[in-house]
Structures are given as structure tokens and as C-alpha cells.
């Protein structure tokens, strides 16, 4: 599965996305030939190799014929342009999705419907070409999955058709709902509505670069000159690296004294029932020589608040510490083996092959209770059967 990861350390725009993909290996000639299927005129395309603050990059230029007036378009006009083109259906569908996101954002900020929205800057020929070219370039590169970094938007103001607006412009801000933003001291508009519409319509997720084997890197140049960083967008192409899985968890902990073991045990049961991934204690020596317990709870971030409430309700603690952690995991699956004690599930952990396998405790316990056999014999039998299968 080919993954394209967009590293937006200096923002993103439609032309920067296309330039980065061509710089990463998309065939510029094939891209121009396919774009000719769009039933629009009044423009010329070019690709320029330039440097931005010392970094080589590709700039994608849509040069408009200023003698040919371009109308303001509604969403239905752009959909008709795409429908009338000879482009592949998959390209049409993705391009329509991008413009629909733009229309929804514009309608929201202007208090109207998507049918009545006038596309101004993003309805011009260069925006139509940028969006279509981005989708075509991803297809030419055989990209199956798009991911993106956190997005910096810049600061200050920007001149729009409606006048001077704060950065991010209202439509851009609307498109960025739910997207993690990156802090950035650069003045000006780093991320444009077209750029963010493309990324939010196509990207599966936003965040750190995933584990992947990189095979190509491309830099796309923007027109603005950066003050604190080069105005380029980087894309990295590659395949996922087989390093298992990872997620975010939260560790909640508190020190307890003046509490009986029975209270601690009951609290642990309540915490597991509330959705904790794990709960454990450690004996500790506290101030003034008091003996105590360190109670630690591991949970998913969205359960942290509810689990804190259980900790406050079921223990005498006056405070709970919270630490966010990134966890690497083996991929898990189950297989069932048949033993003389009955069917036992084997939990298998994988990372570039089978790393570990263990009988499920609850299955082994049920078999031991049903047959009267020692638990350790049931577990050993399950391991033996699994090993003999050559897995």
C-alpha cells in the first residue's frame, strides 16, 4: 500500500501540493495531457525547478490569460465541468468531494446554502486545475493512502474578495475543524482554502509521520517568500513499515496511605469495570515514614475523566496525576486449538511475523473447572498443541 505523507511544516496550498507530487515523481507530461480533458480554457501550465531559502523544489504554475474573463462559479458549474471532462470516474469523484467541502465551508461562514455559494478565488480556473491536478498526480503515483501532519496556518491578516480577513480566513478555519493545528510564528497566510480542502478531503488522518519505508520525497514551492522558514511543502511516499501498532494511552496514578488492602482491592475492581486497560499497585515509603501504595491505572484518553472520578470516589486520595503516553503494541489475533481438555483460544502477537503466543486464561480456567484438571496442565497442553502446529 503506497502512502503519501504531507509534511506541512510551512503550510499548504493547491499549487504546492501538485508541485510536491511532481517533484516526488509524478509524470509532468502525463499530468498536462490528462488535465487537457477539462473543458476550460484561458490558462497555460508550467513546472519550474527553483530554490526556496536554499532548498530545491518544484513550482507548479497555472498562468492565466488575463484577456479572457473568468466567471465566478457555483458548485453546480464546477461539477458540470468535471462531469463533462474525459477524466477517470475516481478522479471526478474525489475532485467533486473537494469542491463540495469548499462549498459547505463557504456556505457556513456566509450563512447561505451550498447551491447559492459563489466561488471567488477557488472558483477560478487555476483553483479548478490545482484540485484536479492534485488528484491526478496522486493517481499517477499509485497512492493508496494519504496522511498529513499537523497544519500551521500562519498569523496576521490576508486580503480576500470580501476584504481584509484574519488568518486563518473564515472558510479555511471552517475547513480545519477537527484538524490538529501546529504553532507557527510565521506572518501571513500559510494554508489556503484550496490546499486545506484537498488535504482534509483526501487524508485519512492528521498527526505524526507513521512508521513507513520512504522511497520518494518531493518538495513543492509556493509563491510567498517565508521569513522564518522556506515556503515549501514536503511529501514523502513509501510503504508502511511492519512495526506493529501504536496508540495513545493515559497513566493515572496516586499515592495512598491510611487505606486497607480490602479498600484498594475493591477500588481496583471498580476501575477495571469503568474501562481501565490495567490497574496495579506498588508498595512505597511515603513522607514521615508512612507505608503506602502507589495505585496506577492505564486507560484510553477518552476514559480518563470517568476513571479519575472512580479513583476519587473509591480511595481517600486528594489528587490524581495524569501522564499521556505513546504505546507500541503487537498486532493481536486469536486462533483456537483443540486439546484433550477442550477448545482453547491462543492469543497471538505479531510484528514482522509471530513474536509471542499465549493461551487465553479464561478459556484455560473454564476447561480446568470443567474437567477437574490442574490449570497449569491445561495451559501446557494448549501451548504444546500450538507448538506442534508449527506456528
Image (spheres, rainbow, N blue to C red):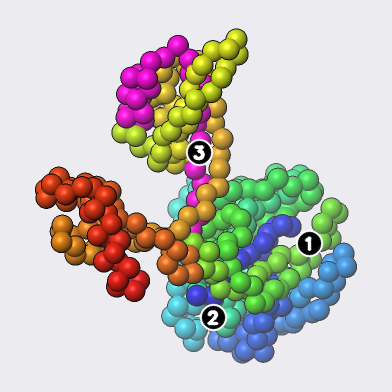
Name the residue rendered at 48%, 29% in the picture. Answer: 282
Name the residue rendered at 41%, 38% in the picture. Answer: 278
Name the residue rendered at 55%, 27% in the picture. Answer: 321
The percent position of residue 11, horizontal first and vertical second, equals 70, 57
Q: Which of marks 1 and 2 is in front?
A: 2
Give the spatial CA distance, label 1 vs label 2.
26 Å
Circles 3 and 2 in contact, beta carbons < 8 Å: no
Of helix, strand and loop, which one carries label 1? loop
On screen, 177 above or below 148?
Answer: above
Q: In the displayed structure, does residue 358 sit left or right of residue 82?
A: left
**How many residues crowd mark 3 within 10 Å: few (<14), some (14–19), many (20+)?**
many
The one nearer the camera, 308 or 100, is: 308
Q: Quadrant of residue 52?
A: bottom right
Q: In the displayed structure, does residue 228 sit left or right of residue 192?
A: right
Residue receiving disc 3:
250
- Is residue 124 visible to us here? no
Residue receiving disc 2:
142
Residue receiving disc 1:
231
Disc on the earlier residue, 1 or 2:
2
**How many residues crowd mark 2 within 10 Å: few (<14), some (14–19), many (20+)?**
some
Extreme residue toward the right, this view:
54
Q: Does the magenta stretch include residue 247?
A: yes
Circles 1 and 3 in contact, beta carbons < 8 Å: no
- What range of the chain is rendered magenta? 245-271
Q: Which of marks 1 and 3 is in front?
A: 3
- Is residue 150 visible to us here? yes
Q: In which quarter of the image is the C terminus?
A: bottom left
The percent position of residue 280, horizontal first and vertical second, equals 43, 33
Mark identifier at residue 326:
none
Q: In the displayed structure, does residue 313 sit left or right of residue 207?
A: left
Amino acid at each position: 500500500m503506497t502512502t503519501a505523507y504531507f509534511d506541512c511544516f510551512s503550510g499548504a496550498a493547491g499549487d504546492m501540493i501538485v508541485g510536491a507530487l511532481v517533484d516526488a515523481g509524478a509524470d509532468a507530461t502525463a499530468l498536462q495531457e490528462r488535465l487537457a480533458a477539462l473543458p476550460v480554457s484561458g490558462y497555460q501550465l508550467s513546472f519550474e525547478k527553483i530554490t526556496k531559502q536554499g532548498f530545491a523544489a518544484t513550482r507548479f504554475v497555472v498562468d492565466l490569460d488575463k484577456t479572457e474573463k473568468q466567471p465566478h462559479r457555483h458548485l453546480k458549474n464546477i461539477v458540470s465541468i468535471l462531469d463533462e471532462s474525459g477524466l477517470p470516474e475516481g478522479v471526478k469523484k474525489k475532485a467533486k468531494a473537494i469542491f463540495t467541502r469548499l462549498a459547505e465551508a463557504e456556505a457556513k461562514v456566509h450563512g447561505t446554502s451550498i447551491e447559492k455559494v459563489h466561488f471567488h478565488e477557488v472558483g477560478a480556473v487555476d483553483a479548478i486545475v490545482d484540485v484536479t491536478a492534485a488528484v491526478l498526480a496522486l493517481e499517477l503515483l499509485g497512492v493508496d493512502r494519504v496522511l498529513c501532519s499537523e497544519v500551521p496556518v500562519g498569523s496576521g491578516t490576508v486580503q480576500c474578495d470580501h476584504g481584509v480577513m484574519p488568518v486563518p480566513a473564515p472558510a479555511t478555519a471552517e475547513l480545519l475543524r477537527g484538524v490538529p493545528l501546529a504553532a507557527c510564528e510565521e506572518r501571513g497566510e500559510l494554508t489556503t482554502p484550496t490546499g486545506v480542502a484537498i488535504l482534509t478531503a483526501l487524508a485519512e488522518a492528521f498527526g505524526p509521520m507513521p512508521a513507513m519505508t520512504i522511497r520518494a520525497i518531493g518538495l513543492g514551492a509556493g509563491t510567498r517568500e517565508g521569513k522564518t522558514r522556506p515556503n515549501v511543502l514536503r511529501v514523502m511516499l513509501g510503504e508502511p513499515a511492519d512495526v506493529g501498532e501504536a496508540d495513545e494511552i493515559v497513566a493515572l496514578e496516586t499515592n495512598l496511605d491510611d487505606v486497607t488492602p480490602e479498600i484498594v482491592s475493591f477500588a481496583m475492581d471498580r476501575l477495571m469495570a469503568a474501562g481501565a486497560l490495567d490497574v496495579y499497585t506498588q508498595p512505597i515509603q511515603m513522607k514521615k515514614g508512612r507505608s503506602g501504595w502507589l495505585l496506577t491505572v492505564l486507560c484510553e484518553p477518552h476514559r480518563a475523566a470517568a476513571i479519575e472520578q472512580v479513583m476519587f470516589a473509591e480511595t481517600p486520595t486528594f489528587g490524581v496525576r495524569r501522564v499521556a503516553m505513546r504505546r507500541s503494541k503487537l498486532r493481536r489475533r486469536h486462533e483456537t486449538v483443540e486439546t484433550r481438555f477442550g477448545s482453547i483460544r491462543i492469543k497471538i502477537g505479531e510484528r514482522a511475523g509471530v513474536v509471542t503466543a499465549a493461551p487465553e486464561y479464561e478459556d484455560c480456567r473454564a476447561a480446568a473447572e470443567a474437567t477437574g484438571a490442574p490449570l497449569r496442565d491445561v495451559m501446557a497442553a494448549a501451548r504444546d498443541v500450538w507448538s506442534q502446529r508449527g506456528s
